[in-house]
Amino acid sequence: MPTQKPPLFARAGIEAIGADSMELDVESVWLCWKVIQRTLESAGQQSLAAALTVRLNSLGKGSERDEYSLALREYFAQCSTLSVASASRLATGGDMLGILDSKHPEDIAACAGAPPISTCWGAETQQRFEDTVSALTDLQVPIQTDATLARGLDYYNGLCWELQADQPAVGPSHSASARALTLAGGGRYDGLAQSMGHKQQVPAVGTFDVVNCVVLATCCTAPTFTHLCAGWAAGVDRVAALLEEANCLPVAQATRWAVIAVSSSEQAGRLARKAATELSQLETGSGHCVTVSLDPVVRKPGKALKTSTAAQAHFVVLVGDAEAAQGAVTVRNMSSRTQEAKSLQELLRQVSQGDMYVHDGR
């Protein structure tokens, strides 16, 4: 019987399915960067964490991607130095974006002069990409737009990204001169469900971290390994069960926050993102933790509160045009059904000092 080849990488990630939202794109990229940044920092690799860069591009809508693929076909037809695999792809009518995604040295050289996909973007795609870059810049994500970044699978569309560390690369798939180690990647793939037999596209965006590479980056300062072999796993539920049995499992009281924009204006969206990200990063006292959800859908205030009740949020932060103009937010206590407006800085101060925690479920 044939033996199953073990996977080269262990992966961890997130997926958000069902909404074609720029907010979800931004949140996915931010989480991808922040999780790895904190992992590296906790491992004592502050300089490496500071050297992380998110490469960013957009594959546009399906029609724009198809137009670009034709432009690439004309360009690559004039190239005589493609790899064997890419030459075969060109001859058999395969997706040309797969050549952009190739890691063969011949293809990388050929792609250097390829036309950028932005030449095929419509006004809507251009605006969404600019808004995404602006939002990520506001969140201090280190980004670099890269017109050569692509996905070779034709169900990908819209935003795509890779998180890289400025680290000598290791492993059989990298050359000795390579400097950037890819730790994570992601993108929007609205066409995946349809490619698997669904009647229509289903909006979806996701990101994955290559756990082996993250572990490798935290442990290595030079390319001393000849193959990717670092990694570990733990049965977290079993460890927790043992600690609970020994009556030494720390119990954290979770205060659930929901942040919702009740206006579609750019100013309100920017303040909502800022509120959610800063709340989620607060240092909390012993025995307490804060969980934060940012609703990707703009809702009317009444609908927003109904959604938050269903999500069992303890506090809701509502951001509208009036609040955003003053840099303020409206905070709703879902238990007492009272609400008040306050500056974002005042809210963060109160939460960090423990003034807005739930106690014994209240």
Image: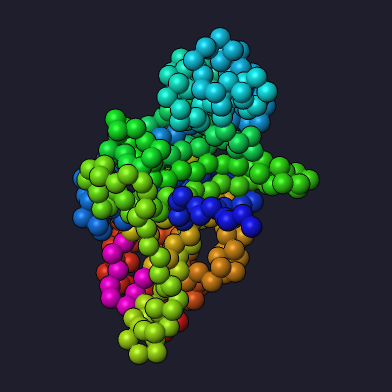
Q: Quadrant of the C terminus?
A: bottom left
Q: Is residue 166 magenta?
A: no
Residue 286 sits in quarter: bottom left
* Left or right of residue 63: residue 338: left
Q: Is 216 rendered above or below residue 73?
A: below
Q: Nearer the viewer, residue 50 or 20?
A: 50
Query: What residue lies at 56% left-to-right and 68% top-to-bottom?
Result: 311
Quadrant in which residue 178 is drawn? top left
Residue 63 or 95: which is nearer the viewer? 95
Identify whether 73 is placed above or below 65: above
| Residue 336 appears in the figure | yes
Residue lying at the far top in this picture: please name it. 78
Residue at (47%, 17%) from the top-left corner? 110
Would residue 34 appear left or right of 66 to someone viewing this image?
Answer: left
For the magenta stretch, what is the residue range? 282-289
Tell me if I can see residue 49 in this picture.
Answer: no
Q: Give the residue drawn at x 27%, y 38%.
A: 168
Q: Position of residue 21 (x, y in %)?
A: 57, 44
Instruction: Please provide percent x and percent y for residue 248.
Output: 32, 86
Q: Is residue 160 left or right of residue 302?
A: left
Where, quadrant-wise, is the N terminus in this rendering?
bottom right
121 above or below 172? above
